[in-house]
Image (cartoon, rainbow, N blue to C red):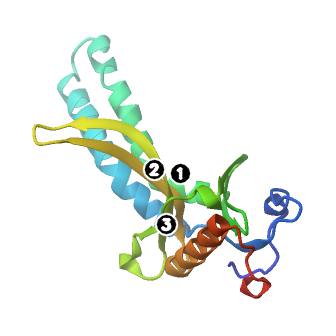
Amino acid sequence: MTDSSQPPERLMRQIEPGERLVWWDRPVRLRLARRAMWQEMPVGVAATGFAAFWLSKTAGAPPPFAYAALPPLAYGLWSLSAPLRAALRGGRTLYALTDRRALILEGRATRAFALARIEFVDTSGLAFGADGHVMFQRTYLGRLATPEHLRFRYSKSGFIGVRHAREVARTLRDLCNRARAGAAPRATEAA
């Protein structure tokens, strides 16, 4: 949980009557920026480099030739700004666990996941200490046919860049198991 023990009003409005808040926190902005850097910046560097190369080769050419570099340049600059945008977005993001749901509040949008329907809990990104990711949602992206076999592609999502990810994952697993069993969590587990 964050330093202040009082959850933000925005989060408390999402808690349903009879529901108990077990844990909440904001993501670590540096973790979000680092993740965005590795995901988007290589493409941004390549697109911006291509646009710069194109502009250098069309310096004396008629304007329509130079205009062809504008879409890759815009895309490249947008991709290069991904870490900054991720850090700013992290300031507007809240993660929470209740005795019934896992909540992700991003800006004005709220995503709620019933604990009884969460199929897996996985931690990743823990190479740099206790901060990391707690993944619990899988989105089907499609099939990838290879000569050897047919694979299904998924994207995982969940709490990205949380403090003490292992403890959060342990709490989430325990809450999911209790929700599936139909048992109410004990009051002594409140964080």
Disc 2 marks a residue whose amino acid type is: Ala
Please tell me in which quadrant of the rendered image residue 115 appears.
Answer: bottom right
Q: Report the mark closest to the observer, 1 or 3.
A: 3
Q: Name the disc covering residue 121, or none.
A: 3
Please tell me in which quadrant of the rendered image residue 55 appears.
Answer: top left
Quarter occupied by the C terminus: bottom right
Quarter occupied by the N terminus: bottom right
Q: Is residue 33 left or right of residue 64?
A: right
Give residue 111's position: percent from left, percent from top: 66, 50
Give residue 181's position: percent from left, percent from top: 64, 69
**Label 2 residue SS:** helix
Q: Which residue is at 89% across, 61% downward?
A: 17
Label 1 close to label 2 by CB (< 8 Å): yes
Q: Residue furthest front?
A: 181
Mark 1 lies on residue: 85
Q: Is residue 129 left or right of residue 108?
A: left
Whichever of labels 3 and 2 marks the residue nearer the N terminus, that label is 2
Cα distance in 3D space between marks 1 and 3 = 27 Å
Q: Which residue is at 47% across, 82% downward?
A: 130
Please tell me in which quadrant of the rendered image residue 51 appears.
Answer: top left
Cα distance in 3D space between marks 1 and 2 = 5 Å
- For mark 2, does the 10 Å Cα neighbourhood hold few (<14), some (14 to 19), or many (20 or more) residues? many
Disc 3 marks a residue whose amino acid type is: Val
Disc 1 marks a residue whose amino acid type is: Arg
Mark 2 lies on residue: 82
Query: Viewer-proximal residue, 17 or 29?
Result: 17
Label 1 close to label 3 by CB (< 8 Å): no
